[in-house]
Image (tube, grey):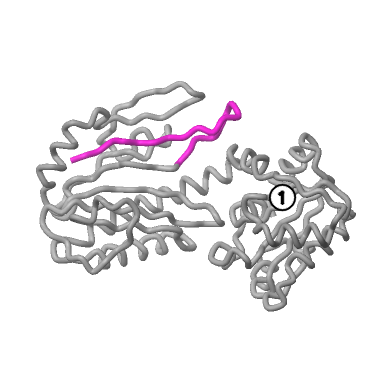
């Protein structure tokens, strides 16, 4: 359980006039607890909910299928109420928890953009004197300002994705398939400690123009453009990195587009809304103090063009603002 997040929510409640905050989405449940209820992202109705009261009390409401996992991940003494999957009594169990905490007639902030309308109607009927109000904006604002722990996780995830993609490209060549590329990619993220991944994009040749597609049995050919992206996950957090390569020499059209790129070989990032500029380094360690993910990659027979197109790493906020870093550098 993340005590710093609980403290943030308590302060936010006092400012907004809530008696409690209820996190119902996988993102906000994981933000508070530090872990996901494994199947909640797959099945929206398999509720995992985290309640924080204005005095800092905590209670979790989880489905029986995941109760043992949640108990194992939670600190000793955590109040965990279990609802029954085939009785569909999640709202009844939640209502009982709210009553137990003296919230039967309270103002409770809830994620109106996640909890299904039918469940909210059932909960309102069970607790007719409670006032359920939209709190998703409050929770989203809290998550915008990253803690040092969160920043460390995002940096680690970005590096996992970056190395996995690099190694996957080096493992294939002409006559390999997109499935071969995907197999190397997934093996790479797990070897480096990812728990699983949220999305994987593998698009090569004529398929490289499709924005969000998975791998097929398509065989790689000489001069194919290859585009790969993956979002490894740890503790409910994910970071996506995308890299573009070519099999052997890049096609002439790719060379033409690259030559016309106005930001070629330049990295930008923001610091307190003031843009700064740096030239990419040929050293793998240079600029590490600035936490930039762009660097030159050695060319090889399998990937002679290697383009850094996206990174989701971040620097610790010093002014209360979320600061992003991104890179549009490329090396050939």
Residue at the extreme top: 274
Residue 205 inside the magenta-drawn segment: no
Q: Position of residue 36 (x, y in %)?
A: 60, 60
Image quadrant containing the N terminus: bottom right
Instruction: Please state if 125 lies on the left or on the right of 281 as rendered.
Output: right
Q: Is residue 275 visible?
A: yes
Residue at the extreme bottom: 86
Q: Where is residue 199, by image quadrant?
A: bottom left
Q: Position of residue 282 (x, y in %)?
A: 25, 36
Q: Position of residue 173 (x, y in %)?
A: 16, 61
**Helix, strand or loop for disc 1:** strand
Which residue is tagged 1? 110
Residue sitting at x 73%, y 43%: 9
Q: Position of residue 160 (x, y in %)?
A: 40, 53
Instruction: Please state if 225 lies on the left or on the right of 241 as rendered.
Output: left
Image quadrant containing the C terminus: top left
Which sits in the foreground, 197 or 257?
Answer: 257
Instruction: Please state if 147 lies on the left or on the right of 124 as rendered.
Output: left
Which sits in the foreground, 215 or 67?
Answer: 215
Which sits in the foreground, 296 or 322?
Answer: 322
Q: Which residues are magenta?
A: 313-332
Above or below residue 137? Residue 85 is below
Q: Is residue 38 visible?
A: no
Residue count near mark 1 (Cα–Cα under 10 Å), binned few <14, some 14–19, many ≥20: many
Residue sitting at x 14%, y 66%: 175
Q: Main secondary structure of the magenta part?
A: loop
Residue sitting at x 33%, y 38%: 294
- Tally of numbered tags: 1
Q: Where is residue 184, by image quadrant?
A: bottom left
Q: Where is residue 222, by image quadrant?
A: bottom left
């Amino acid at each position: 359980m993340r005590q710093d997040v609980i403290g943030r929510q308590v302060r936010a409640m006092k400012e907004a006039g809530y008696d409690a905050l209820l996190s119902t989405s996988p993102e906000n449940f994981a933000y508070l607890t530090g872990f996901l209820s494994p199947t909640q992202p797959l099945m929206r109705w398999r509720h995992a909910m985290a309640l924080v009261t204005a005095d800092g009390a905590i209670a979790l409401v989880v489905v029986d299928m995941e109760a043992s996992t949640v108990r194992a991940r939670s600190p000793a003494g955590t109040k965990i109420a279990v609802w029954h999957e085939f009785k569909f009594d999640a709202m009844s169990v939640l209502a009982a928890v709210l009553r137990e905490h003296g919230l039967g007639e309270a103002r409770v902030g809830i994620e109106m953009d996640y909890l299904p309308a039918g469940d909210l109607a059932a909960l309102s009927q069970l607790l007719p004197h409670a006032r359920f109000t939209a709190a998703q904006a409050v929770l989203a604002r809290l998550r915008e300002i990253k803690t040092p722990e969160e920043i460390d996780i995002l940096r680690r995830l970005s590096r996992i994705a970056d190395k996995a993609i690099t190694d996957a490209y080096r493992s294939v060549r002409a006559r390999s398939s997109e499935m071969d590329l995907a197999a190397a990619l997934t093996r790479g993220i797990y070897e480096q400690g990812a728990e699983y991944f949220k999305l994987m994009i593998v698009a090569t040749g004529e398929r490289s123009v499709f924005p969000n597609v998975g791998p097929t049995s398509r065989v790689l050919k000489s001069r194919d453009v290859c585009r790969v992206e993956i979002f490894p996950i740890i503790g409910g957090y994910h970071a996506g990195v995308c890299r573009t390569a070519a099999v052997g020499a890049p096609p002439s059209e790719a060379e033409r587009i690259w030559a016309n790129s106005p930001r070629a070989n330049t990295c930008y990032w923001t610091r307190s809304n003031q843009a700064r500029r740096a030239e990419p380094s040929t050293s793998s360690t240079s600029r590490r103090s600035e936490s930039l993910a762009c660097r030159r990659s050695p060319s090889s027979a399998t990937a002679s063009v290697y383009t850094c197109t996206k990174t989701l790493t971040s620097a610790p906020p010093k002014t209360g603002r979320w600061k992003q870093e991104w890179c549009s550098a490329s090396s050939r």
